[in-house]
Structures are given as C-alpha cells and as structure tokens.
Image (cartoon, rainbow, N blue to C red):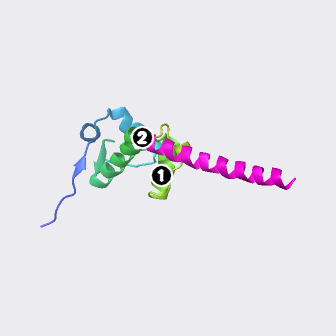
Amino acid sequence: MKMQRRQFRIGELAKQLGVERFVVRFWEKEFQISAERSHGGQRFYEEKDLEKFLKIKELLYERGFTISGAKKQLKSNGSKIYASQKTTMTHAERNSDHTEIEEGIKTIKNGLIRLKNLL
C-alpha cells in the first residue's frame, strides 16, 4: 500500500504558520520556494515546505532578522550570526558586544600609556 504525502493548500499552510496568504506568497517569491501546482494553478505545499516556512518565520518574527539576513542564515545553515543581519539585538548580545569593545579600549589605552612612558 503506497502512502500519500501530506499536501497543504495555501490557506491551510498560512493558517498553520499564523500568517496571511499574501505573506506566504511573498516569502515564496523572496526565498525562491516553488510550490507544486495543480492543472488549475492551485498551489500545493508539502511538509518540507512547511518546515522551510516555519524556519523563515522564526528568523524574521522571533529572531529579528531582515529578509536579507534570513536568506544568508538559511544558506549558511546556522553559522555565526552577525548583528548587521538582524533588526534587533538581545540584551545579552548587546552586553557581549559592549564587553568586547571595553576590553579593546583598555588594550589600546594600556598600549598608549606604555608608548607615552617610552617617549
């Protein structure tokens, strides 16, 4: 007995994602996701498409990425995220960046003090 793949129409997919249909169509275009179509032109999506859209939604809505940043993140499959790819930063990310900057300033300051003492 052959098992059939689960397919979704755009309305059902949008409902599962919690977004409007036009958002699904926009993401489809922006992220180059091609849905299967019936003879009448009706879009049909599979489970793997739902997973892609869920990842896109997470990147855009929950993690604050821009469209461009989300595209890069999807291509890189989880490598380091740069702040310029996000629209917002978490408090921890800001603190981490702030600490790194302060350490850099201290290093430069100490180097300048040593240089001044040599002169």
Q: Is residue 42 magenta?
A: no
User: Mark 2: few, some, or many residues within 10 Å (few <14, many ≥20)?
Assistant: some
Side of 66 relative to 102 (left or right): left
Q: Quadrant of residue 14?
A: top left
In this rendering, position of residue 119 left or right of residue 54: right
Left or right, 108 with respect to 40, comes to right
Where does the image place residue 11, in percent across and percent down from the top left? 26, 37
Could you tell me the amino acid type at mark 1? Gln
Q: Which mark, residue 27? A: none
Query: Residue 9 location in percent, x, y?
Result: 26, 42
Residue pointed to by mark 1: 73
Q: Earlier in the sequence, mark 2 or mark 1?
A: 2
Nearest to the observer: residue 33 or residue 94 = 94
Q: Nearer the viewer, residue 104 or 119?
A: 119
Q: Is residue 109 visible?
A: yes
Q: Mark 1 falls on what kind of element?
A: helix
Q: Residue at x 61, y 50 (%)?
A: 103
Q: For the magenta stretch, what is the residue range?
A: 91-119
The three-letter amino acid code for the residue at tag 2 is Leu
Most common secondary structure along the magenta stretch: helix
**Residue sitting at x 36%, y 44%:** 58
Please name the residue that numbered disc 2 is placed on.
60
**Residue visible at 24% across and 50% down in the picture:** 7
Q: Residue at x 48, y 58 (%)?
A: 79
Q: Residues within 10 Å of mark 1 (few under 14, many from 20)?
A: some
- Residue at the bottom extreme of this rendering: 1
Q: Which residue is the extreme one toward the front?
A: 117
Asked whether 87 or 91 is in front, the reply is 91
Q: Percent from the top left, x then y, of residue 8?
A: 25, 46
Asked if one can make out residue 39 in the rendered structure from this viewpoint, the answer is no
Estimate the spatial distance between the alpha carbons at disc 2 and disc 1, rounded to whole Å.
Answer: 11 Å
Q: Percent x, y for residue 107?
A: 67, 52
